[in-house]
Image (cartoon, grey):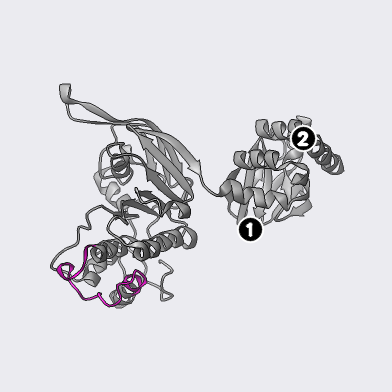
Amino acid sequence: MCAMLAEPAAPAAAPIAPLVSVEPAVRVEGLNHFYGEGAARNQVLFDNHLEVPPGELVVMTGPSGAGKTTLLTLIGGLRSVQAGRLEVLGRDLSRLKPRDLVEVRREIGFVFQMHNLFDALTAYENVKMAMQLSHERPDTMRQRGVEILSRLGLGHRIDYKPRSLSGGERQRVAIARALVNCPHLVLADEPTAALDRDSTRIVVELLKSMTIEHDSAVIMVTHDYRIIESADRLVHMVDGRIVSDVVLHDALRICEFLRAVDLFRALTPTQLTDVAEKMKKRKYEAGETIIREGESGEEFFLISDGEVDVVRADHEVARLGRGDFFGEVALISGEPRNATVLATQPLDTFVLGKTDFQSAIESSAPFRDQLYRVYFSRH
């Protein structure tokens, strides 16, 4: 159950095909889309690629007609995939039967440009409709509905019908309805267009908390540049194509982390930034094997949070934690991995590919010398 409230819900009815949290939440590969038929057929999306992992807030920008809303509705299963591959929450949408597609949509929170509220229902009753789809216990619905509406600044409007609400208030009711079940994926099309500064801040903070507290992925189409500073990534579309996909803040956070690691202190600020921009975040579950003895070495790992056991010939030889690194021996020697590394608890890492690792060594003699000293001490 969503952790907005501490009270547990009754067990949900089993879906036809259970959905699980996977990496990534959304995978788009070579996606094309067309409107019209015959001579009137017009291509609106061109060979788009995108991956969105759980726990990320992605802001999608671009001029009107760029294809943002079309892409969003395809990801939400509201349009049929015509060409390319589209996976959402581990399911290939092009292969799903209508019944299974409904199950996927239930894991998605939708916020449209139009609020689409039921005029005959109060703010709470509109939100309640979403909870009924998730098999929520009747005695907890009121509590949860009131809580999320209050969090969005509508505590005094809970029993008001849409005609008695302002445009911004109606939009916040729609947002509450989309988020009340803490969906694995949130798709929002201009969710703050009708909101003032304070309401926008509240909504963005709630969306951001969804990514942190519930590992939800959020994709938001917007022209509101007030939101960008809270985003993890910025995707820009022009004429039906994703022309840029930039991870925001990660390089800065990685840089700050690397500065605290003895190995990387030999790098100049420029070299450090270059390395940080090439590192990728990667998560592992407790018990998961990260590298295996005897395999070829293709990546260097730096531990951001968590611990690993280093095992050689079935015997533990080391336990590494935050700020420690591993995987450099095979990259330097060219030999197979000389140990297996297992996550002992949920693990966050920064990963550097072999080519970028070797470039970092070649660019800084002090870094190379320090790395080799570590290498010989471990080898």
Marks 2 and 1 close (CB-CB < 8 Å): no
Is 213 drawn above or below residue 292 in the view shown?
below
From the viewer's side, name the closer residue of 367 and 335.
Answer: 367
Q: Secondary structure at mark 2?
A: loop
**Left or right of 51, for residue 261:** right
Q: Quadrant of the C terminus?
A: top right
Residue 75 left/right relative to 322: left
Q: Is residue 342 visible?
A: no
Does residue 101 sit above or below 142 in this rendering? above
Mark 1: secondary structure = loop
Give, as a single range, the part of the protein colored magenta. Answer: 147-167
Is residue 225 highlighted in magenta?
no
- Please give the residue where the numbered disc 2 appears in the rendered image: 364
The image quadrant that residue 235 belongs to is top left
Q: Is residue 82 above or below residue 227?
A: above
Residue 154 within the segment the image draws in magenta: yes
The kind of residue on which mark 1 rests is Gln
How much space separates mark 2 and mark 1, taking CA atoms? 34 Å
In this view, the residue farthest toward the top is: 39
Q: Residues within 10 Å of mark 1 (few under 14, many from 20)?
A: some
Q: Can you identify the residue that label 1 sits on?
A: 345
Q: Residue at x 34, y 70 (%)?
A: 148
Q: Nearer the viewer, residue 316 or 349?
A: 349
